[in-house]
Amino acid sequence: MGDTGRRSSVPHRCPRQEPAVMPPLPPPTHSRRLGLYALAVCVLAVAAAVVSFVRGSVFIGIVWVLLAGLSSNMTWYYVKRGGAARDRSGTG
């Protein structure tokens, strides 16, 4: 049937294989671009929240604050993701 993961009693001698060479990662332009878009959304959402609160619309202001928090987290995620990709690829 299938491989059960057990080793046979006869030692299997084979030459050691070299690890496969991985190609370098592409530059993290997508992460950087998405991070900048998320940052722009965050700034605009904060501005919209301020305008909403000034005009007296508390509920809409709270929605804008929540959207600003979400986009802030997305910005942080994409910035960290881009930095990790740069660290892995060895460029900086």
Image: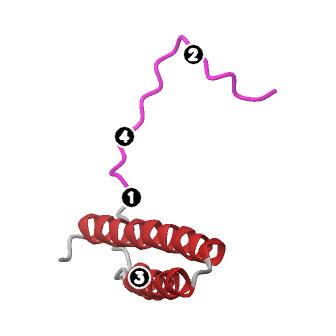
Q: Residue at x 62, y 80 (%)?
A: 57
State the SS at label 2. Answer: loop
Q: Residue at x 56, y 68 (%)?
A: 66
> Mark 2 and mark 4: span between their CA atoms?
18 Å
Q: Which residue is mark 4?
A: 15
Q: Which residue is mark 3?
A: 39
Q: Which residue is mark 1?
A: 20
| Badge 2: residue crowd in 10 Å (few <14, some 14–19, many ≥20) | few
Q: Which residue is mark 2?
A: 8
Q: Residue at x 41, y 80 (%)?
A: 35
| Sequence order check, earlier mark of 2 and 3 | 2
| Badge 4: residue crowd in 10 Å (few <14, some 14–19, many ≥20) | few
Q: Foreground mark, 1 or 3?
A: 3
| Sequence order check, earlier mark of 3 and 4 | 4
Against 9, residue 20 (above or below) is below
Amino acid type of the residue that numbered disc 1 sits on in the rendered structure: Ala
State the SS at label 3. Answer: helix
